[in-house]
Image (cartoon, coloured by chain):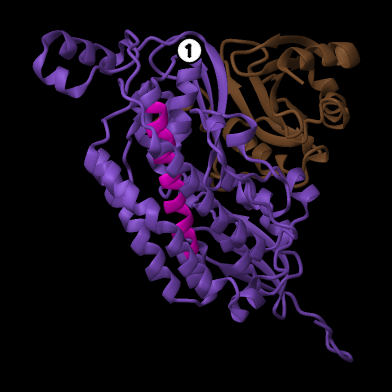
């Protein structure tokens, strides 16, 4: 299955769940509304032709001037097809998305890191705590308004 | 463990680390123990968090190369390669053939060096002291070769955007050849010491078993995934640097226990040696750097003697680096698994976002799952078998 076929398959089977599809430089890209995230992710994993079974990465990008402020970005790999897909979910400041740990267990720590670094909440996460920073740290260091040299307590 | 009569089960909480020789760095494991049985493992990380992703947003694309050396310090060349490939993909740079072959040589040498370090220290964890000396003897030869081409043993920053920093010499090829010719015999030596050693087998067999299904579900990559029986390697699945032209096998395990992980890594060293022999046979002539205006640096000799090259070097290094807007995720097969870079560019000389996907981080997250109900001594074997480097876990 090549990159165009992935997009075609998604448009054919799950177009109601997506907000837009495109071809990136490296892989197909899908924008999903946070309400449909779990349903769409389950489709990606369970659809036999697509079978995106290996979660590569969960991260976020901060766009302070934009509303909603964050993009939570998922990279998922299909071992069967040798293809990767990027799923993007826009999330507002102080808001969150459903955790995808019910689809891929491996997302657990990746989501904790996003929570720690950006302050994006993941609902129904089994163990949502800070992971790299200390428990009582008040800020989210990878936000663009956090200074590089840190904040003195 | 069964408790007889009216004795009540007592749970003990034990801190292993952050300073503990078997954690290979500063990792803290909070263990819930019932006697000697581990009921629950809670890894606590972040002691080595240096904020490389944040630093990356505040440094230029060229400066970021040196940070990649310091992620997984046992595989610096591979880290350089992953980062360089991501930026090249974003800029659409075609790397010259000679540089591609040199990159493959360096990446495979680094894979052998990383696996040797793992084997030596892992055997040390389990209690087999002598293997360590043998492994480090060969690793030293590889580090000498790295020093020869880049001037550094552990932090080479050798593979850079557009190619490699310096050309390899005839002396290097000679050393490489003698290394490749003898290395399979050395692997046989390690295997003689370990593979059928009853203590070694007893300690590793059926410890920390991860089924293929679980391994995929937990997102593990690299030898951990392959030991569980999944024939998956990014060098084969998404070839880069011309890996599609080399013949090599992907070793897999059957059970997914620590012993399989050991076997897979040993076989991977053999396969890396096989790739090295093929790559070495025919190193094409030509340039070692792509020539892209405002992206790739001119050769150092020219910078020292030619005013135009000097100006060009100064401009690129001081921030005139030109990169299109866009975003890219690119990953390679590191010795420990998938190392991915997700770079978002806003067109300036600094990445808007530089995300590092570390396989060690994800593989470590599966540790509590695979060590449920094991003994404390087995936990050491399990932790060593997933081969983590805390520099990459915490970033």
Helix, strand or loop status at disc 1: loop
Colour purple, chain: B
Q: Position of residue B317 (x, y in %)?
A: 27, 18
Q: Position of residue A65 (x, y in %)?
A: 57, 10
Answer whether residue A149 is visible to the viewer in this image. no
In the rendered view, would you say B95 is above or below B55? above
Identify the residue at image location x=37%, y=33%.
B102
Image position of A98 (left or right of B94): right
Q: Position of residue B21 (x, y in %)?
A: 46, 68
Magenta stretch: includes residue B114 = yes
Determine the colour of chain A. Answer: brown
Residues in magenta? B99-119
Front residue of this view, candidates B279 and B12: B279
Number of other residues with Cα within 10 Å of mark 1, as a class: few under 14, some 14 to 19, many 20 or more: few
In the rendered view, would you say B375 is above or below B282? below
Identify the residue at image location x=49%, y=59%.
B118
Answer whether residue B367 is visible to the viewer in this image. yes
Identity of the residue furthest to the bottom in this view: B5
Question: In which image quadrant can residue A1 be found?
Answer: top right
Q: Circle 1 sits on which residue?
A: B92
Report in which chain the residue with disc 1 lies. Answer: B
Q: Is the N terminus of chain B in the top left, top right, bottom left or bottom right quadrant?
A: bottom right
Magenta stretch: includes residue B35 = no
Identify the residue at image location x=87%, y=31%.
A46
Image position of A127 (left or right of B26): right
Q: Main secondary structure of the magenta part?
A: helix
């Amino acid at each position: 299955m090549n990159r165009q076929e992935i997009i075609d398959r998604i448009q054919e089977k799950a177009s109601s769940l997506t907000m837009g599809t495109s071809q990136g430089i490296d892989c197909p890209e899908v924008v999903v509304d946070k309400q449909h995230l779990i349903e769409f992710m389950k489709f990606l994993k369970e659809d036999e032709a697509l079978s995106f079974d290996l979660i590569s990465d969960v991260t976020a990008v901060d766009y302070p001037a934009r509303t909603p402020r964050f993009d939570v970005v998922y990279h998922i790999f299909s071992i069967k097809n040798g293809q990767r897909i990027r799923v993007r979910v826009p999330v507002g400041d102080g808001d969150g998305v459903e955790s995808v740990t019910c689809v891929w267990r491996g997302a657990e720590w990746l989501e904790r890191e996003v929570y720690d670094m950006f302050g994006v909440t993941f609902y129904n996460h089994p163990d949502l705590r800070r992971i790299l920073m200390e428990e009582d740290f008040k800020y989210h260091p990878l936000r663009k308004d956090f200074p590089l040299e840190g904040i003195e307590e | 463990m069964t408790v007889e009569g009216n004795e009540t089960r007592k749970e003990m909480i034990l801190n292993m680390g952050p300073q503990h020789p078997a954690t290979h760095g500063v990792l803290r494991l909070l263990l819930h123990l019932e006697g000697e049985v581990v009921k629950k493992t809670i890894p606590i990380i972040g002691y080595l968090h240096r904020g490389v992703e944040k630093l990356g947003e505040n440094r230029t694309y060229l400066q970021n190369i040196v940070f990649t050396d310091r992620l997984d310090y046992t595989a610096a060349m591979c880290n350089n390669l992953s980062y360089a490939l991501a930026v090249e993909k974003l800029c659409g740079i075609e790397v010259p053939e000679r540089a591609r072959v040199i990159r493959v040589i360096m990446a495979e040498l680094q894979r052998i060096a990383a696996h040797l370090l793992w084997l030596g220290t892992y055997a040390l964890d389990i209690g087999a002291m002598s293997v360590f000396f043998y492994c480090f003897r060969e690793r030293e030869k590889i580090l000498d070769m790295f020093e020869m081409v880049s001037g550094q043993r552990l932090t080479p920053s050798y593979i850079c955007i557009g190619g490699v920093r310096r050309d390899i010499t005839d002396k290097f090829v000679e050393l490489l050849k003698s290394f490749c010719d003898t290395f399979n015999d050395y692997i046989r030596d390690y295997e003689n010491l370990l593979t059928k050693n009853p203590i070694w087998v007893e300690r590793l067999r059926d410890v920390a078993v991860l089924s293929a299904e679980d391994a995929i579900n937990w997102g593990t990559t690299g030898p951990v995934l392959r030991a569980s029986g999944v024939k998956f390697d990014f060098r084969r699945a998404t070839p880069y640097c011309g890996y599609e032209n080399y013949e090599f096998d992907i070793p897999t395990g059957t059970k997914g226990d620590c012993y399989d992980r050991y076997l897979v890594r040993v076989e991977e060293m053999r396969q890396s040696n096989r790739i090295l022999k093929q790559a070495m046979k025919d190193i094409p002539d030509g340039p070692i750097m792509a020539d892209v205006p405002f992206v790739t640096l001119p050769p150092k000799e020219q910078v020292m003697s030619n005013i135009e090259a000097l100006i060009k070097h100064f401009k690129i290094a001081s921030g005139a680096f030109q990169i299109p807007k866009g975003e890219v995720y690119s990953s390679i097969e590191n010795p420990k698994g998938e190392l991915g870079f997700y770079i978002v560019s806003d067109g300036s000389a600094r990445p808007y976002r530089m995300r590092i996907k570390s396989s060690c981080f994800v593989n470590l997250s599966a540790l509590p799952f695979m060590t449920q109900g094991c003994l404390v001594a087995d936990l050491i074997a399990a932790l060593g078998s997933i081969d983590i480097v805390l520099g990459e876990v915490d970033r």
